[in-house]
Image (cartoon, rainbow, N blue to C red):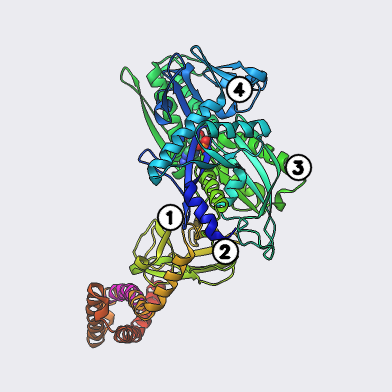
Amino acid sequence: MSRDSQSTTQSSAGPIVGIDLGTTNSVVACFDERGPYILDEDAGPLVPSVVRYSSAGDTVEAVGVDARLRAVEFPDRTIASVKRLMGRSARDAASDQPFLSYEIVEGAHETARIRVGERIITPQEVSAEILRELKRKAEAALGTPVQRAVITVPAYFDDAQRQATRDAGRLAGLEVVRIVNEPTAAALAYGIGAGASAPQTIAVFDLGGGTFDISILAITPAEEDDNSPAGADFFQVLSTAGDTHLGGDDVDHMLFRLLATEISQQFDISLDRDVLDLTASIRQAIREFSESIKITLSAEESAHVRIDLGAGRFFERTITRDELDALLAPWIDQALVSCRRALRDSKLEASDIDRVIMVGGSTRIPLVRRRVGEFFSVAPYTALDPDLVVALGAAAQASILSGDDRSRLLMDVIPLSLGIETAGGAVAKIIVRNQSAPARAAETFSTSVDNQTSIKLHILQGEREMVEDCRSLAVFHLAGLPPMPAGIPQLEVEFLVDANGVLSVSAVEKRSGKRASLQVVPAHGLTRDEVERMETESLTHAREDMTRHRIVDLIANTQLDVKWIRAQLDRLSADLDPDYRADLEKRIAYLDDIITRAQSDWRSVDPEDFHSAKQALDEASVRMHEISIAKSLREDENHPA
Ligand code: AMP
């Protein structure tokens, strides 16, 4: 079938959405010619996988956020984590009963069902309510009926669990065009396989709120000459392992226990099996603080809490990231035990893994990233939001199935230059377009302002010379630098684009050793047309852009030099002959004037004039440098160390 007739089929049947039907949260995504994107509403992208029924169990009262928020009020009729029951027997599901607030009963063919009031509900029906909510959300965002979906399931789901997921889709009025493994979807979201020439082995490390899964995938790219449609790469799950009760919730419990024990000791409040003798709302507040401390410590080095315990008592505590890391070490070790098992089952060594993809909210914890990176000896992929990556991959699969996979940019060459913002809003290109991937390049920069303790790194893509004409990919900060004069810090910035097209940027300030890094997928949301447009624009504006970049750089360099010369003029006041001083001051005034004009309208300045004036000042100031050095030496002789 030709692409045209396939697109016609697609438009008559409406869009295909990608759905991550998760244990805790679900997400729906779609695609257009720019690639997959999340269907978002004011409430945010995540729909809590929670359904509340009426007390008789015959009607649905709430799905999503509202059902989750009021779960503690209606524990026996609020159904959360239904994914744990999908397609399972009541006997198998019984091990989950202690973690669930509602009652599991046995239905026909020994299947697990849920009792709410008088009614016995199947897990498929509950999942269908969540899917219906996602369908509604997608229809509202797209403004068109949605009848088809790709839905993801864990790689270890058996036939019964996959069939139950299909049934849930059907009940929700969705044709499930494909069930895709979650780790495969994560790889697709990163464009893995697209255009690559060599087979790859990928580990997908999925650590959510309550579950941990590790999957090892082998990806064999489609042969270039076999005429298979884009995306026909072969994804094979080599092994899976995990722990159905390991996740971020454990971290919240550990922090809760730490706070509860200290509160109990400090205020002499009794603590019995994790229950403090305080009101339910204060206990709930302490639980919420536990999660927010954890989330703060993913971004900051320390987190401070002040908890009102009532009766004029306040508990205050600052928890550092090091303290949390020490608490988490055994918890991460447990996840790594599963990783070892998965490797053993697929008969591989950690060093055989080419790439690791991070999925699930708990992979935002820096220690998790670090330990996983050390375990597999590769920096894990974190460029895409770990809560959204599976839904994005489901939408990528939907795009392939609808024959509309124009979004994929082959990454064997880097289509647009990559660089960082420098002083005055110019862009320094670090990797230039059309280099083949993988590519690595580094450059050293410094600061233009005194005593900067944090340096902003703005990553850009495009061919133009100024920030405003390029595409902004990401911003991050290298913080915690000791104050130093402008020009003294040595910031080495390294760009690495790997064979899958993922860009890792790392920055190190060499004098202090401070480091920071970040990943992005530069091809995300870019179409071939856009690449072409950006290229054409750069040609049209080439001369103008070059001039502007040159002037911006001249301004930054002149300002730094003039600042130094002015400081020397003050220091050497008695040592300089007045004519020489006047000459330097005249040159500085001339340059000051050029800079003022350039800053209001760069076109009003002739770059050649500017450059010669700057050069003339440089030459004229050589004598002052010599006088300055001689004076410093004299001072040293008079005051030996
Ligand atoms: P998921 O099941 O993938 O939605 O993951 C949810 C888990 O991720 C919960 O335990 C959250 O507390 C945790 N989480 C979300 N954001 C962060 C963060 N920034 N740092 C640490 N944990 C987080």
3D distance between C-alphas at marks 1 and 3 = 38 Å
Task: Say whether mark 3 is within 8 Å of ligand 1.
Answer: no
Q: Is residue 416 above or below residue 249?
A: below
- Residue sitting at the far top: 118
Going from the N terminus, do you reach mark 4 or mark 3 first? 4
Q: Please identify, in this view, whether the residue under mark 1 or under mark 4 is nearer the observer.
A: 4
Tell me the kind of residue under disc 2.
Leu
What amino acid is at disc 3? Answer: Arg
Upstream in the sequence, badge 3 or badge 2?
A: 3
Q: Give the spatial CA distance, label 3 vs label 2.
A: 33 Å
Secondary structure predominantly adopted by residues drawn in magenta: helix
Q: Position of residue 566 (x, y in %)?
A: 28, 74
The magenta-colored residue range is 553-569
Seen in the picture, residue 448 relative to 555 is either above or below; the reply is above
- Answer yes or no: is residue 49 visible: no
Circle number at residue 241? none
* Residue 499 visible in the picture: yes
SS class, disc 1 = strand
Q: What's the distance in space between the residues labelled 1 and 4, CA to CA?
A: 42 Å
Point 35% across, 83% down: residue: 618
Which badge, 2 or 1, is on the more N-terminal residue? 2
Dot 2 corresponds to which residue?
A: 410
Task: Categorize mark 1 by other alpha carbons within 10 Å: few (<14), some (14-19), many (20+).
Answer: some
Q: Nearer the viewer, mark 4 or mark 3?
A: 4
